[in-house]
Amino acid sequence: MTKIKKAIIPAAGLGTRFLPATKAMPKEMLPIVDRPTIEYIVEEAVNSGIEDIIIVTGKGKRAIEDHFDYSLELEENLVKKEKFDLLDKIKKSANVEIHYIRQKQPKGLGHAIWCARKFIGNEPFAVLLGDDIVKSEKPCLRQLIDQFEETNSSIIGVQRVPDEDTHRYGIIDPLEKSDRRYQVKNFVEKPEKGTAPSNLAIIGRYILTPEIFDFLDKQQIGAGGEVQLTDAIEQLNQFQRVFAYEFTGKRYDVGEKLGFIQTTIEFGLNREDLRGPLEDYLKEITKNINQSKV
Ligand code: UTP
């Protein structure tokens, strides 16, 4: 049985939904409370047993590399001030083996994955997108790896989304279901409103066999004028079985503004040092909102 050891985290997108904040700062570095979103993703990969991570970066993404590097000046300063808890936190992010590759132009997610093909070689691998953070008992990626170990096939993470949102996602046309795992007839990227074959949406976690690169090599342009990973998965599925797996856990959509704010509040409420004052504040402002409605 081949082990999934490598993961790609594509982070070369333009982050247009967060402009102007993302003009000079990578979207992946926007903090949820006090940790950049990409740190939650790296943590999930490591907790799922991934040994090597490659981050696909692009123009203006240097801050990601700096974040996962040592910062001797900062470390010395924290030692001097005896702030050892903070020292532990910043050192932890530098302890993971991360590699980088540049996508020279943001031609789409499919193209970003293709840029990492030489790093992956001829073995199955994982992909994690930074737009989705998943809180679950067993890490979301680990759930998919367990499915891979049963099937030896590509596995795509899915969850149900509201019907009115399906046009924003890659959607599956499901066939038979066994437990939470689906055989899939078709994978459709961003179906037009009212045409989605289901409301099971691809949510930023994938296990893929290396044959996916045969289809990404073609660099076909799909929805939004971009090389879409979903289109290559659809072609792979005609050639070898690709399953979808409805993972368990709560998914936070941090790739868009409202989801980002909601995640920040919820993660803040889960933090012992913040819960009390944050709850008081939320009660206060909701009271004001209700009063202003009267
Ligand atoms: P998104 O479309 O959600 O990210 O791509 P984006 O393009 O940065 O954001 P918006 O839509 O403009 O606000 C999903 C993932 O694929 C990466 C992104 O960084 C994100 O993690 N991506 C996308 C690339 O690495 N390269 C690309 O050319 C496009």
Image (tube, grey):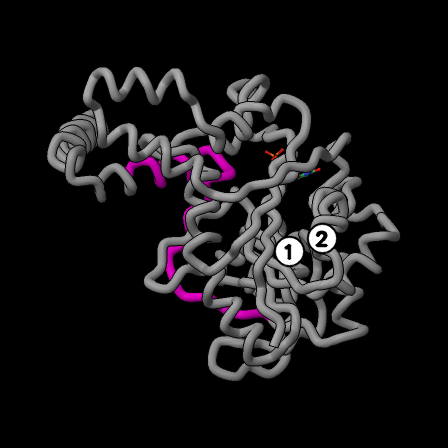
Q: Which mark is residue 229?
A: 2
Residue 245 inside the magenta-drawn segment = yes
- Counting from the top left corner in percent of width and height, residue 255 is at 51, 39
Query: x%, y% of residue 281?
Result: 16, 28
Q: What is the residue that sits farthest to the right in this orientation?
A: 218
At mark 2, the secondary structure is helix
Name the residue at 49% across, 30% down.
Answer: 69
Q: Which residues are magenta?
A: 244-265
The three-letter amino acid code for the residue at tag 1 is: Gly
The answer to which of marks 1 and 2 sits earlier in the sequence is 1
Which residue carries the number 1 mark? 170
Task: Work out whether residue 48 or residue 21 is closer to the camera in this orientation and state it.
Answer: 48
Q: In the rendered view, would you say 256 is above or below 176? A: above
Q: Quadrant of residue 224?
A: top right
Residue drawn 70% across and 65% down? 209
Q: Which quadrant of the figure shows ligand 1?
A: top right
In magenta segment, residue 141: no
**Residue 240 location in percent, x, y?**
76, 75
Three-letter amino acid code of the residue under disc 2: Leu
CA distance for labels 1 and 2: 9 Å
Side of 229 where 145 appears, left or right? left
